[in-house]
Image (tube, grey):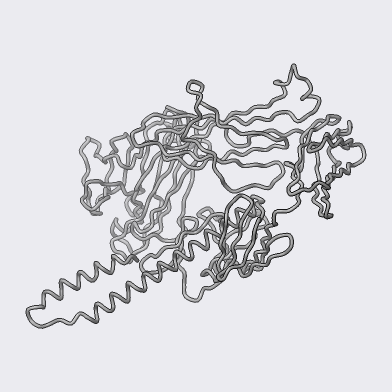
Amino acid sequence: MKPTKFLELFAVFGIAAMTFAGCETYDDSELTGRVDDLENRVQALEERIEEFQNSVDEFTELINQFKNDVRITDFAETSDGYLINFSDGSQMHIKHGELPELSVVFNSELQEYVWTANGEVIVDDDGNPIPAYIAPQFEVRDGKLGYTLGNEWHEVTNGETVGLIADVVETDDGVNFILSSGSIITIPKVGFRLNIDYFEYGAEPGKTVVINYNLVDGDDNAEVLVYPDEGFTVVNRGYSLEVTLPADEETAYSGKVLVMAVNGNGATSAKVIRFGALVTEITSADVINVSRHGGLVSINISSNRPYNAMIQSDPVTFIPPNWLLPSEGPATKAPREDVIYYEVQPMPDEMDEDRQATILVQWDTNIKEEQQDYMNYENYIIKREIIINQLNSKDVAVDKPMDNDGNLYPADKMENTLLEGKLEGGWTFKNCVVVEYDDDNSEVRLALNGLNAVEDGRGSLTSPILENGVGIFTIKYSSIMPNANSRQHIIFEVKCVDDAGNLIDNKKYEITQNRTLQAESVIKEETFEFNVNQPCRIVVSNISTKKESSTEIKTFNVMKIHSAYYTSYKAE
């Protein structure tokens, strides 16, 4: 709760005091003291929130450093914790103390650290554990401290003092972060290290693979030693190895080469390299559609050969698009599975045209015989293109609702009337109510009714035929209740159908809220990736069941639509 709320409360009591001023002198010192005390408590609570948020953000950064193999360059103990410098130039200040209820555990299936609350794994709406590289957001709601994680609000209750980092221990080689769950995250210090890009390289039997390497913090006496299995031949060229595979496929793909670096002090660093059939695949879609609101785009690459991913410049201006930027996301450590990220910037409000960019993924050959075939070198280069379409998607929820004769519907303040009609943009609706969207009633929104005693009483919203198909569809919604103490449980489905109403490619999703919603205090957002490349319709239906004791429409788990927009499968 913000301090301004208490000031408003104080103003109300102030008016009451003036009302009785003519009768007797009113001593408001006790009230003033209470308000001051409340404001002090709120300020202290907000200070705790800031402290919690800073600590959680730093812990999330620690998880990302661990995933990205960043090293520690400097470690120092301070009066209130530890100051750590990393090899990527970042710095972290971990303070002594505990965080309420939150902790992490390592999920062996996901190979990730995930969040827990009171020992229970926190999951998202789909039931998936939430990775610890996603930071919760602390805030106060209705005077209670809590945090949002995975689009869900969690209240911090009294007595919950499970911390994130229980202790920090420095060793000769690194720093151990001991978690309250008992797990240990170890981040090595910068030191002598052998770097080789891959654990597996793709090549045909009998070919010679050129593998680059480098040494971190090496000295003049550092050596790189190679121990190949029988049948392999290795030549060390100094910062590159030429490994010739056996001609027999079984021997070539079952064998290995051990590479070990030793410095003048006897410190060692080693890598084992294996070989297999060449893999150069884009495993995600080659056309990615993004709404005008932008967002993070991920490209999945399966590869055992070094590659480059580049945003292509405009063929006319020779300037790369300024709305598509490389970004960071959850790192991967699998030998042949990579995920690279790009951030698509939101379209300017005045922009009403689609825009497109191309990402080129290129594998140059690392086979010696092919590198020396200068006349045909271009033939050995492998290229893949990914098209990013940012589509001008209109928010259909802002369209005015009308009856079938074109007359605008006013807000009906949740009377017992179910309406049908159409929106200005051509979407049709039935079994809905029209509700106020802002204080002055200058805007209204549709609300879809849940199932009730009325035959076919399910509220629905249906698009016109979308000739260019559908890429993604996003909807924001809340529930509506007759009073602030009510709760409702929204269940709805979204599907993609053809002109005859037949479901397309099983494109149907049902969303069930795992907890009840309070009127507009919780606005949920869902995004559906349809990727239907044919004319189709989007249908949103409220399939919530009514309360058994209810006899009024307004208690049938009404679903208020705040925003709804889609992108075409291909640019219009």
Residue 239, picture quadrant: top right
Relative image position of residue 231 (x, y in whole percent): 92, 37
Q: Is residue 119 visible?
A: no
Q: Is residue 369 left or right of residue 38?
A: right
Relative image position of residue 158 (x, y in whole percent): 47, 75
Image quadrant in which the N terminus is located: bottom left
Q: Is residue 338 left or right of residue 275?
A: left
State the residue in front, 119 or 134: 134
State the residue in front, 423 or 205: 205
Q: Residue at x 72, y 41 (%)?
A: 197
Pick out the residue farthest to the right. 230
Q: Is residue 159 visible?
A: yes
Residue 462, picture quadrant: top left
Residue 139, picture quadrant: bottom left
Q: Is residue 388 left or right of residue 280?
A: left
Give the vertical position of 252 relative to 265 (above or below).
above
Relative image position of residue 266 (x, y in whole percent): 84, 54
Q: Residue at x 43, y 35 (%)?
A: 567
Image quadrant in which the C terminus is located: top left
Give the vertical position of 532 relative to 116 (above or below).
above
Q: Is residue 209 left or right of residue 454?
A: right
Give the vertical position of 165 relative to 34 (above or below).
above
Q: Residue at x 75, y 19 (%)?
A: 374
Relative image position of residue 160 (x, y in whole percent): 51, 73
Q: Residue at x 82, y 50 (%)?
A: 263
Pick out the residue farthest to the front. 220
State the residue in front, 23 or 153: 23
